[in-house]
Amino acid sequence: MPGAVRTEVHLQSADTAGAFCLLVDHPPAGWWLPLHLHRGVAETIHIVEGEFEMEVAGRHTRLGPGDTLHVAPDTMHAGCNVGDAKGRRVLIFSPAGMERFFLEAGAASDSDAVDPQDVLSAANRHGWEFAPGGAQAGGRPDAR
């Protein structure tokens, strides 16, 4: 994925009768994802390792190991790894289907390059909407 984020798909739609998909990602220190929403899809984020700053509907929250945050469908949110090391998060999207974005937009290995424009196009096809100017310039949440 862009930003050198390794993402593993552990459960897909077929595994859960469409109820949810489960992924694990590994965002490096300094990684951030600008304000965006997922049309009709909720996201639950559980931090396993690392320190993250999340913005959900204008509210900033600092998360560390053991913390969990739920983002309701159609809610603007952003996040960044504010720690000094690679993090690890469990991501649950419900209903399932978001895994198709990660499978389409990702690369098989860290050495395979991905085109950011192709990733943005895939995100749009899979129900992601970015805040105006967000996908290019972004709005990195303030580290607190």
Image (cartoon, rainbow, N blue to C red):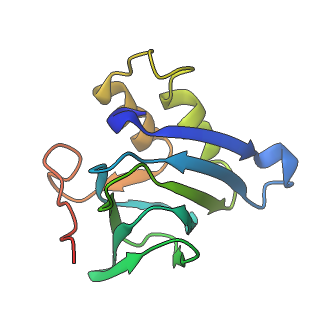
Q: Where the N terminus falls, by quadrant?
A: top left
Indicate left or right for 75 with 97 as reference.
Answer: left
Front one among 26 and 38:
26
Decide: is 24 above or below 51.
above
Residue at (47%, 50%) from the top-left corner?
127
Q: Where the C terminus falls, by quadrant?
A: bottom left
**Residue 112 placed where, x, y %?**
45, 15
Mark yes or no: residue 40 visible. Answer: no
Q: Residue furthest top?
A: 112
**Residue 101 placed where, x, y %?**
54, 39
Indicate left or right for 105 with 135 as reference.
Answer: right
Residue at (46%, 54%) from the top-left corner?
87
**Residue 123 placed where, x, y %?**
42, 41
**Residue 51 placed where, x, y %?**
39, 66
Q: Quadrant of residue 59?
A: bottom left
Indicate left or right for 2 with 68 as reference.
Answer: left
Q: Residue furthest bottom?
A: 59
Front one among 55 and 57:
55
Residue at (36%, 25%) from the top-left corner?
118
Residue at (62%, 38%) from the top-left corner?
100
Q: How many marks?
A: 0
Decide: is 131 above or below 86.
below
